[in-house]
Amino acid sequence: MTRRRQVYEGKAKVLFEGPEPGTLVQYFKDDATAFNNKKKGTITGKGVLNNRISEYLMTRLGEVGIPTHFVRRLNMREQLIKEVEIIPLEVVVRNVAAGSLATRLGVAEGTMLPRSIVEFYYKNDELGDPLVSEEHITCFGWANPQEIDELMHLALRINDFLSGLFLGIGIRLVDFKLEFGRWWQNDEMRIILADEISPDSARLWDLKTNEKMDKDRFRRDLGNVAEAYQEVARRLGILPEGGPRDIKGPDTMQ
């Protein structure tokens, strides 16, 4: 097979040149990181599970009119996506106090918020992805006011849909991170959802027990990380038959 050109490698994914102009292949790794890459590890089968979970959620969002970069899943660890210009912001939607919000404001973890909060963080690992305001975003040209409004609108629509979807399978969507990109088609630009939605990028708690079913199990050394991801996939009805069989990276990256 012809070796594909690698375009980008992040902490959890690798992007390769796609088979058609304007496309990329997104490969999901088993690598796990936390605290801005200070804690590192491997969760066997995580890439397989996140590929399937993100495929399912992106597809469902597309069905209700949310534009996404997802085209189709190629195999257990790869999916075909539209090539976009990533907006250098992490858009975080919070429904329950947890993580940095609880620490920063001294709010007890697990406190239900009176309304959903949307926060923006500048994507820069060296700076620790700092929290930024709309003033910062427009001042430094990361997005204009109209784009910020669109990011807010899309983030809240996604939150409404996913909160209901997870509620239906006994999971509380505590908070989650989104990334968006500018996609050009016929000289027209559109902001669409990019990256992934998975237990890597969302806090998911069991509705009855508040058991954590996401990457916090890795961050906090709670154990059974892979099992938690598998349970999310099982409840969504998409756990690969026979479990998340591992596919060695080099076989799919050629």
Image (tube, rainbow, N blue to C red):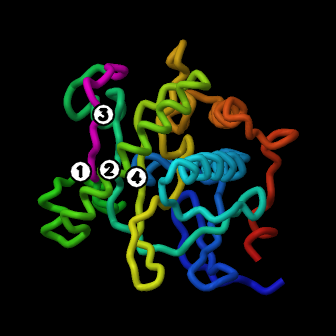
Magenta segment, which residues? 109-120
Residue 87: image location, x then y, percent? 35, 67
The answer to whether 221 appears left or right of 250 in the picture is: left
- Label 2 crowd bin: few (<14), some (14–19), many (20+), radius 10 Å: few
Disc 4: which residue = 36
Q: Secondary structure at mark 1?
A: strand
Q: Amino acid at mark 4?
A: Asn
Q: Nearer the viewer, mark 2 or mark 3?
A: 2
- Disc 4, SS: loop
Q: Which comes sooner in the sequence, label 1 or label 3? A: 3
Taking the spot 62% from the left edge, 66% from the top edge, the residue there is 26
Q: Nearer the viewer, mark 4 or mark 1?
A: 1
Which residue lies under the disc numbered 3?
Answer: 116
Q: CA distance from mark 1 to mark 3?
A: 17 Å
Which residue bears the numbered disc 2? Answer: 153
118 falls in the magenta region: yes
Is 6 above or below relative to 142? below
Where does the image place residue 99, in percent across and percent down from the top left?
A: 36, 34
Q: Residue at x 56, y 72 (%)?
A: 82
